[in-house]
Amino acid sequence: MSQLAVQVDTVLLKVASRCNIDCTYCYVYNMGDEGWRNMPALVSEETISAICRRLAEVCQWQSRRFATVLHGGEPLMLGAKRLKKLLMSLRAVLSSDYPIAIQTNGILLTPEIIEVCDQFDATLSVSVDGPAAVHDRFRIGKKGEGTHAQTIAGISRLKEHPNSKRLFTGILAVIDPFSDPVGVYHYLKELNAPSIDFLYRDGNHSKLPFGKRSLESTEYAQWLTTVLDLYLRDPSPPCIRFLDDLIKLSLGGQGTKEGLGENEYGIFIIDSDGSVAKNDTLKSTAPGADRFEEKWSVHSHSLIDILTTDEFRSYYSLQHPTSEKCKACSELKVCGGGMPLHRWRDDNGLDNPSVYCADQQFLIGAIRKRIKLAGHTA
Ligand code: SF4
């Protein structure tokens, strides 16, 4: 194995480049990038074979287990039959210690699809932003209608499965800083998912995230600090990955996901045509920002060869912030400079602190204060 090659942690498979709903904040369809129009609506059998062949090579090449996440668009637009073929092909090269996860809006979760996931040991995380009034503000259908009821119905079907405890791994919630954090916390907790992950909204220095008045304002941190206090007081809290990581990092431990801390993660996308791309959240910065200069594809390139190129390494190094402010920041080890997409400014690219810098400092400060009050050293 080359010492210079990046190790793979997560492969995101864009198995559907279309979605059954039309969330207004979606970086794939509603933030200016039109790349999805050139992609096959659904991944073909030929592309699935090429993906599996390339993933098998990675399994041979590195001992570290990596996760494969089916993404979209909406991955369940594949339908039960195609999903079964895809998972069967993936499982033929990925043993059960390689997690396969699906990120879905939950609406198309039928008993048949859930059964297929169970059969091939694929887990499901569902996007829910909160109670109906919060969720339906942005997560809408093609005619502008709310989608909350359909998503919750999908989760109910998932929970009815005898192996739901293993299948249903979590909820992904995008923060609306105008929503009531107390109501959102209790609502998501009641859904009984083993884990909840909160996400900052997309945005950058040239296009401030929804709800942020200025670079100095801390709307998201205040919202999250209210959740933090509920979480710390709750005798039976759910697992909240974002807060857990911040707490662990503040105590000198390690985070588990990109966007916090200084760990490096080998993550890339395979699009529905088999092309290899960067993390597609970069689409929110500028059209085509998720594409490599090289036109790599699983049809013609080995992933291992791609991972050893200078271009891939320079994409990989984007995880570390380059701005002087971040490099000198006393909270760099905890914050990590945030996600690259949040560092973007039209005139100087990514050479900036996160657009959530003030929020991160506020939130990390709040965590340190509470750790100190609890008698620990942060
Ligand atoms: S984004 Fe802000 S808080 Fe985070 S490392 Fe950079 S300067 Fe520090």
Image (cartoon, helix red, strand yellow):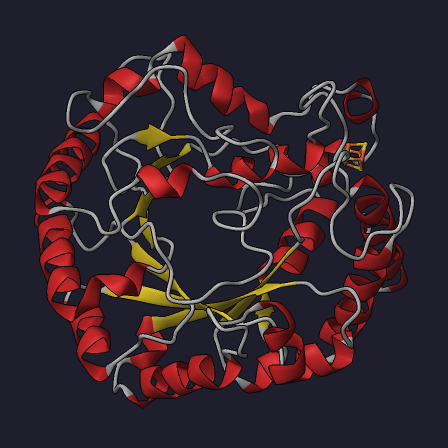
Quarter of the image that includes the N terminus: top left
Q: Is residue 316 above or below residue 119?
A: above
Location of ligand 1 given as a quarter of the image:
top right
- Residue 213 in percent (x, y) is at 88, 51
Q: Is residue 301 above or below residue 241?
A: above
Q: Residue furthest top?
A: 310
- In-image side of 210 versus 106 (left or right): right
- In-image side of 47 versus 220 (left or right): left
Q: Residue at x 25, y 16 (%)?
A: 305
Inspect this view and state whether residue 299 appears: yes
Q: Residue at x 73, y 83 (%)?
A: 183
Residue nearest the observer in this picture, 50 or 360:
50
Q: Is residue 310 above or below residue 8?
A: above
Q: Is residue 60 above or below residue 158?
A: above
Q: Residue at x 61, y 83 (%)?
A: 132
Res 274 → quadrant? top left
Res 204 → quadrant? top right
Inspect this view and state whether residue 11 appears: no
Numbered disc total: 0
- Residue 269 in percent (x, y) is at 36, 37
- Residue 119 in percent (x, y) is at 14, 70
- Residue 36 in percent (x, y) is at 38, 43
Q: Residue at x 57, y 24 (%)?
A: 318
Residue nearest the observer in this picture, 40 or 314:
40
- In-image side of 117 versus 219 (left or right): left
Res 215 → quadrant? top right
